[in-house]
Image (cartoon, rainbow, N blue to C red):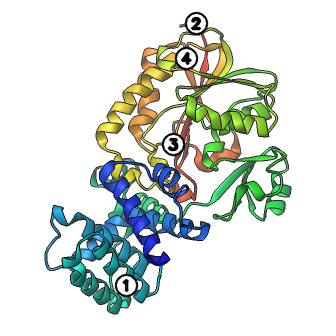
Amino acid sequence: MKQALYTRLTALKLLSLVLDQGQTAKDVFTKQLDSREGINTADQNFVRTLVLTTLRRLGQIQIILSSFLTKPLSHKQKEVERILFLGTAQLLFLDIPAHAVVDTCVELTKQGKLSAFSKLVNAVLRNMERQKRTINIPHPIANLPIWLRINWEKTYGLEKVMLFAEKFVVPAPLDVSVRSNPSVWAQKLGGRHLNFSTVRLDQGTTISTLSGYDQGEWWVQEASAALPVFLFDDLHGKRVADFCAAPGGKTIQMAVRGAFVDAFDISEYRLRRLKQNIERLHLEKQVRVAVQNLEEASPQEIYDAVLLDAPCSATGTIRRQPDLLYHRTSKDVERLSELQKKLLKKAMGFVKVGGELIYATCSLQHEENEAVISSVLQEEQGFERVAVSNPHFKAFTTPAGALLVTPDQDQDGFYACLLRKVKTR
């Protein structure tokens, strides 16, 4: 089998696992692509790009394809449809030469024993190529599921949602947090200092080969995810609990600022990555790691500060995880908001009087953010909100005094609210 065909066949299989079996793109890349024989690094990168582009643009692709088909493909013709998804993504959004796209897509129909549809695939893609310059590409808002679009329009307004959608079709950059001197490290790493301790690099960089990696001078952490910890006052010498800590970027931030951190997570597997980073950054004396289900936990120690990075719908990370567009529903948001309330109430029991608690999510859903805080504070009288006062957060501060980063600010969506314990519950 020719290599060009093999890479497309691999992409087709991975796309089907995401769309038809509900697997995440991250998991299929890790389990199905990274270990696949007969495919080099360059081809692996092409497969990732092709699958992610198709997922990011699928709503647009479906609308465009419908104008080239005389009738919709049936459910039994799903694999043919997937082949046309990949072909459209290559022709219109990746600018792959037409002959390579058409030839490999036609061959895919034959490999999948769908030869009866080879003429259809050939005709659709050749016609699409001929009309390429006159095709009206729908706005990226077409990629959002209806439930999500309605929800966001209610919260943010149509104009802002359109900006979100435009950002989601652009591959995400690579951000790292540095221990110190971010401007200096931006020069060393060939990136730019974004804010606080964040340096933004070009995507596609081989992380482990960069200056400072082995010395533990920095760690990978998306820019908006790095912001909540800076809501805490001076952490030096304080005891901090980090719940739902893995993969651990915030744990490391707090330890670097001088805190002694107990990092808890329900997943032993996810904590392995955190332990590796702690060792690489030589923070073993400041961080303790333990598997714990916060829902079932009771305080064995009371802390100066607590961080709860709660399980959430992660809708703020769609640029990095476009499969969320097909895996999340409004029911998930309802379920998660109830879990978040339970976890926040539990976390409050670990805070000493006068201590602080940060509730954070990478969700853009009001139901998982402000609604959770308002609901819990009505029931828990011992805590008060602390409004963001740092002028560096001005662009990210909500009217209620919380932190909210939105995708139109060229970062992942992220929410955080600082609470202070004023009396015993």
Residue bearing the label numbered 1: 103
Contact, mark 2 vs mark 1 (Cβ under 8 Å): no
Q: Is residue 384 left or right of residue 154?
A: right
Query: Judging from the image, what secondary structure is the residue with disc 3 in?
Result: loop
Q: Position of residue 282 (x, y in %)?
A: 82, 35
Q: Which mark is residue 348?
A: 4
Contact, mark 3 vs mark 4 (Cβ under 8 Å): no
Query: Judging from the image, what secondary structure is the residue with disc 2 in?
Result: loop
Mark 2 surroundings within 10 Å by alpha-carbon count, few (fewer than 14), some (14 through 19), many (20 or more): few
Residue shown at 44% from the left, 47% from the top = 315
Q: What amino acid is labelled 4 in the image?
A: Met
Of the numbered discs 2 and 1, the one sitting upstream in the chain is 1
Residue bearing the label numbered 3: 362
Q: Position of residue 166 (x, y in %)?
A: 45, 65
Q: What amino acid is labelled 3 in the image?
A: Cys
Residue 253 visible here: no
Task: Give the Cα separation between the discs numbered 2 and 1.
Answer: 70 Å
Of the numbered discs 3 and 2, the one sitting upstream in the chain is 3
Residue 186 visible here: yes
Q: Is residue 37 left or right of residue 140?
A: right
Q: Is residue 10 above or below residue 407?
A: below
